[in-house]
Amino acid sequence: MREPLRRDMFEDPDCSSQLQPFRFGDKWSGRMLRCLEDGPRRFSELRVPLHRVTPKVLTETLRAMERNGSLTRTAYDENPPRVEYGLTALGRSVLGPMDAACEWARAHLPELAEARDAYERG
Amino acid sequence: MREPLRRDMFEDPDCSSQLQPFRFGDKWSGRMLRCLEDGPRRFSELRVPLHRVTPKVLTETLRAMERNGSLTRTAYDENPPRVEYGLTALGRSVLGPMDAACEWARAHLPELAEARDAYERG
DNA sequence: CAGTATCCTAGGAGATACTG
DNA sequence: CAGTATCTCCTAGGATACTG
């Protein structure tokens, strides 16, 4: 809980997120859910594991998820500014089916690789 | 079982497939799994419920799914030609997590609509 | 029937630079 | 820190026409 997000969080080559057989919302939403499952995070915190996303796209992703009720944006009136993004109950509930999908991917990774190879061979 | 596929199979406005909170593979793969779950279908059969897809894209989708091991293509040496597409065990196994996703979407449809409205209002 | 072959377009996403 | 503002690019996907 509440540990800093690792920069390589989504870069394990054995991670099922690499082949993306499923997509939750747009390109980054699924990963976003993972980033927030242990509690709210700041914009700059999210940029660490999601370091391939530009601020523009990160903002777009956050706005879209806010719009569909997956997360809330809380701005604290401080200087320097502080903003936190946290999952709503609705957003958290998506983790259920997402875990099912991840579980499937993990379990079938070898079969997927084998199928691809078989197709290439002829 | 084995009933003809309805043209409006994916056009029920209450169908959770309309808002596509999840995507399985590309745009048409998820629907394709549904089309094939009751047994193999011919190219032209698939064009009925998937009548918005062009033959080119339908072919691309089928090839992609064949490549990743979700389905098999069987061509019978007849005239006129007959080709059937059927799910593999791997392809069928995807229906598990997909059902979980559909179940989630169905259960949370009202919340999703409400969240969207709330965002618009404020 | 079961596809190819061409051409074309929208929009998701990235690169880069700037700001309250 | 937490974003905007522009500009650009790529490619999934569609329109249309043709074929073994």
Image (cartoon, coloured by chain):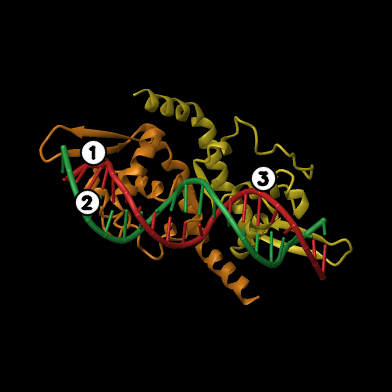
Chain colours: A orange, B yellow, C green, D red
In which chain is the residue bearing label 2?
Answer: A
Q: What residue does disc 2 label?
A: A4
Viewer-proximal residue among B93 and A45: A45
Please state which amino acid type lies under the numbered disc 2: Pro
- What numbered label is drawn on residue A97? none
User: How far apart, in angstroms, are the residues tagged by discs 1 and 2?
Assistant: 14 Å
Q: Are marks 2 and 3 on the same chain?
A: no
| Picture quadrant of residue D9 | bottom left
Q: What residue does disc 3 label?
A: B52
Q: Are marks 1 and 2 on the same chain?
A: yes
| Picture quadrant of residue A12 | bottom left
Q: Mark 1, mark 2: which one is toward the viewer?
A: 1
Q: What residue does disc 1 label?
A: A84
Residue A13 visible in the picture: yes
Q: Mark 3, mark 1: which one is toward the viewer?
A: 3
Q: Mark 2, mark 3: which one is toward the viewer?
A: 3
Please state which amino acid type lies under the numbered disc 1: Glu
Q: How many marks?
A: 3
Q: Is residue D4 above or below residue B86?
A: above
User: How far apart, in angstroms, are the residues tagged by discs 3 and 1?
Assistant: 42 Å
